[in-house]
Amino acid sequence: MSATIETAKSARRSCRPDAIRLMLNNRLATAGLVILAFMTALALLAPLLPLAAPDATAPAQRLLRPFAEGHLLGTDALGRDILSRIVWGLRVSLAVGISATLIAAFFGSLIGLVAGYAGGRTDTLLMRGIDMLMAFPYILLALAIVAVLGPGLINALYAIAAVNIPFFARNIRGVTLGLARREFVDAARLSGKSHTRILTSEILPNVMPVIVVTMSTTVGWMILETAGLSFLGLGAQPPQADLGSMLGDGRRVLFNAPHVALMPGIAIFLLVMSINLLGDGIRDVLDPRLKSGALTRPVARTAIELPAGETHADPVPGAVLDVAGLKTQFQIGSKTLHAVGGVDLLLGETECLGLVGESGSGKSVTAMSIMGLVPTPPGRIAGGAIRLKGEDLLAASDARIRQLRGGAVSHVFQDPLSTLHPLFTVGDQIIEAIRAHQPVGHAQARERAKALLALVRIPNPEQRLDAWPHELSGGMRQRVCIAMALANDAELLIADEPTTALDVTVQAQILALMNKLRHEKQASILFITHDFGVVSALCDRVAVMYAGRIVETGTTEQVLESPAHPYTRKLIDCVPVLGEPERRLDAIEGLPPSVDDLPEGCAFAPRCPRVQPECRRGEIALDPLGDGRAARCLFPLVNDTERPATDA
Amino acid sequence: MPDATALIEIDAVERVFGGGRTLFGGHKPGVHAIQQVSLEVRPGETLGIVGESGCGKSTLARMLVGLDKPTGGAIRFKGENVADAARKDFGTLARRVQYVFQDPVSSLNPRKTIRAILEAPLVHLLGLGRSERRERLAELMDAVNLRPEFLERYPHEFSGGQAQRIGIARALAASPELIVLDEPVSALDVSVQAQVLNLLDDLKARFGLTYVFISHDLSVVESVSDRVAVMYFGRLAEIGPSKAIFADPRHHYTRLLLDSVPVPGRPVLAPEDGNAELPDPYDPPPGCAFAARCPAADDLCRSKRPSLEEGAVDKEHLAACFHPPLLTGEKRAG
């Protein structure tokens, strides 16, 4: 799966609309941008606009209602034009908000960067200082700072900036901490860069989006805090117009002239709201976590869009799993990635089929398609049939699929640490798996969970039930995952590279265990791997995938001993084999084709040493070669005992 | 073991993580990642280091290039202490010893072009001028078989194999004598893995390099190494010429590793319920760390730690085992 996501990701990157277009797609953010642009323009153009002088008092005109002659928004208690004061006040609020943000961002980021990069004692000292700053309620701290420095707009600005430094420092430190341990920082060190240079030229560019996001979400607060201090009479001093102090003035006449307080209130609301909407939009565009698709919630089951009138051969009797012509696609922007382009698989009872291929070949997507686990969007099943013991899974209801998942069909994934929930004991997780499918009590389920742990040869199953996933080694965790997969007498086990993340001695144990269990529990296994050694340890038959299609199938022995497809041959020859160190590795030149732009004819033709002009034309079928073997090649290697010359 | 011909001498090196004292003087628990490791790297050879995760091989690799410091013992490059050299002037050391990382993509800064990445060592280590840099970059890209127009691109535009070639080009940039390769092909697809292994082989011959090749994949190590060191639980279990180790392992752990590798056409030999747990690193056993898993272990193994001479065949092939597997004198079948 990871491999496919990787391909999908890189594809997304290349055809991703640029950041600005992406943000404009967000309607709320666009609305925020428009309002903010309008208000900023007003504020900037204030001296040029035909407005009354903001500080000119006219006692005769006091407390005029809105829409009064010459005073669109009315006048305040001293007869000053409210519209003019709001426009001039906007200037102050924006200027103070933005400069306070810049100051806080600069010092906070500096502290965060240094603390996160240096670590150790420097980190402790700096962050404890920040903690002390955070221990006070922010308004109290701001009040204290203003009390020391004296009231005034500039002092309020300093106070607000100081109060917000911890917010930046902690955010940036967290990100820096993650980056400072990354390999590219070590690499820069080995390239001779000094610490200062690494901080400014390697880490800062990667932290910049976080700083911008944090800034965009804090400007609004800062404006509110400035208004708050001014409201208390500690910020802008009369007669200067400021939204906060206008609110404060309006408070005295709130009951006989509510508009005096209401108008600046609305202005503050609009300003802060527009900034926040825009800030959220910026965050969505720049935040790497949100960018990678956390905002698009995939639905519970892969979308199925079968073309009308498509027919498939009748289900093969006796087959546990029968996949015919399966097509799974990803829609990324304007591109369609044909991750799986017509795959046929047949899996008999207690049979183990190895699905072999490199990353991006579509082997994981094929496996995920069976139970509808491919995320939609962007994935969809666009053709074919999947039958489990004759039952059409593509036509089954969502409820039925949910019943089958973890029941008759279960998965074992590559990384057991990320498959197991870190906050529940392994016992709870196995019990949950049992009770989701079987009407048994907790005590009974626990007994069964214990038996399952014993089945996968975990020593002291009773005690291990109460162990947390992090307390177990990788091999033990994978055994727990296998136990969960077997909890409900699965008929089909889909194992997606279950041993790739394990050490070689542990891998051998897990393989031996799976081999034994499939006979004990009468389960069929679809085993996905890239390693022919692993295949030969466990699988009866092999299907080799390349660029979303099966290029060769046959029994493990046949395929390993005399591969028919040149790709299979090359794939076997390019791996060093233990005990044959002298062999020069026969590398496959070039790269696999990208699945959004497959060449006509054979997808392997551009890398194939035996390519003929015919290979680049038309559709090449998976031709049977007898003995249950088949290869998607016009010039298969069978009956051709001579190995390629490079191998001599 | 002082040896004038060695390029790098690792002398009884130890690395403890954690440990030390708390604020109130109590002892903090420490983990011995590396204990009493002594070996040498000879000029022009490829020394393979194998072991499973947690055996300390990456910690050793980082200490070789000065990214980490040993807490005991010393690593000497041509007689000069690496930790001192790294403290004094990291650049001088980095000109002679370089490193290739496991994950090619995360070892390249995503926000820098390949040109900026490859120019960094040329500017900061060699102090080359603009035109010399241009020449050297062209040479480097040619050496790793990448097209020169790739220089203007960003790391995410490359496949794993191409990114690893860039990582290799960066290591080559300062013309080092020794390159430490930390699992350089394990993140790559098998078809690309062979391309990179062949490239490394060619570069070694062309530039007269010495490699320390770290991997968990025994078949890869066997195909590239002249000598091999097997590590278990922070210590050397066995060291010797590659051929001798793979044909006639003298440590039961090496034997187990070899038997565990899935080889096409060979059934799995491992027991499915073997205890594969490593000993508790906070409370290491007094004897041989492998004793709990070892078929030949007896009371001696559990109480006393075997030295590397204990199971030695000759002074080249050493093994820390009291009861080493018997020599067959002939190549294993299979």
Image (cartoon, coloured by chain):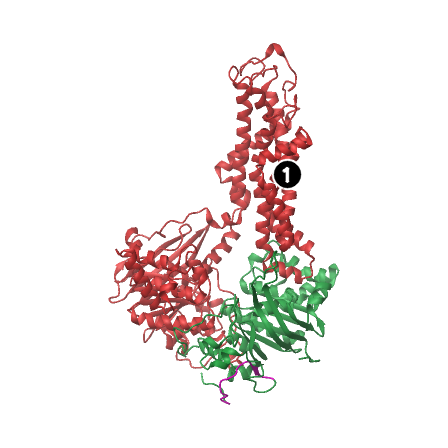
Chain colours: A red, B green
Q: Which residue is mark 1?
A: A162
Disc 1 on helix, strand or loop? helix
| Magenta residue span | B316-329
A62 displayed left or right of A150: left
Q: Main secondary structure of the magenta part?
A: loop
Viewer-side residue, A145 vs A289: A145
Q: Is residue B121 visible?
A: yes
Amino acid on which the number 1 mark rests in the picture: Ala
Question: x and y percent of residue B55 in the render?
Answer: 54, 70
Q: Residue furthest left?
A: A317
- The question of residue B226 being in magenta is answered with no
Q: Is residue B298 above or below residue A507?
A: below
Residue pictured at 65% horizontal, 43% vertical = A106
- The question of residue B325 being in magenta is answered with yes
Residue pictured at 63% horizontal, 40% vertical = A104
Residue pictured at 59% horizontal, 34% vertical = A140
Question: x and y percent of residue B101 in the render?
Answer: 59, 65
